[in-house]
Image: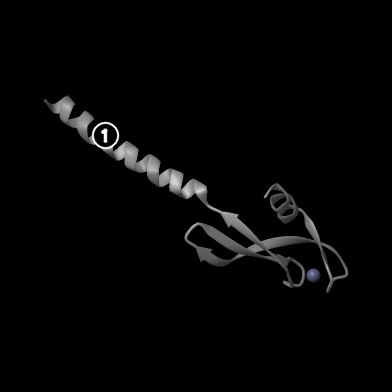
Amino acid sequence: MNQFEKFSASELYCPKCRCSQPVYERLLLVLPNAEIYDIRCQQCATSLGQREARAPSLATQMTLNKAAATQKTPSRRRLRA
Ligand SMILES: [Zn+2]
């Protein structure tokens, strides 16, 4: 996981440019628990690989929002009463 993050942030060797080039990521596919990014050369847009980004933070955020919502409702009632 860390390896992928490191290499996606840095430059990659592009076979078309025949040298190391900065890359950008393009969202390729959205799965229920992950997103697939296409890693492309910024110079010639050649696809150099794919990266899978899992999204556990989204589930955590939803759980947190739910918890916050359930906490707010009784506290308001208590304040009014
Ligand atoms: Zn290139």
* Residue found at x 50% / y 63%: 31
**Whole-percent x, y for residue 70 in the image:** 27, 37
Query: Eyeballing the image, is 57 above or below 44?
Result: above
What residue occupies the far right of the structure in this picture? 18
Which quadrant is the C terminus positioned in? top left
Give the image quarter of residue 51.
bottom right
Tell me: is circle 1 under 8 Å from ligand 1: no
**Whole-percent x, y for residue 65 in the image:** 36, 42
Query: Eyeballing the image, is 17 above or below 7?
Result: below
Query: Eyeballing the image, is 46 above or below 81?
Result: below
Task: Using residue 28 as the reference point, say whether residue 68 is left or right of it.
Answer: left
Three-letter residue code for mark 1: Lys
Ligand 1 quadrant in view = bottom right
Task: Using residue 33 as the reference point, say whether residue 78 is left or right of it.
Answer: left
The number of numbered badges drawn on the structure is 1
**Whole-percent x, y for residue 38 in the image:** 65, 66
Query: Eyeballing the image, is 22 above or below 5?
Result: below
Residue at image mark 1: 72
* Residue found at x 47% / y 60%: 32
* Residue found at x 88% / y 70%: 18
Give the image quarter of residue 54.
bottom right
* Residue found at x 62% / y 63%: 37
For numbered disc 1, what is the local secondary structure?
helix
Give the image quarter of residue 39.
bottom right
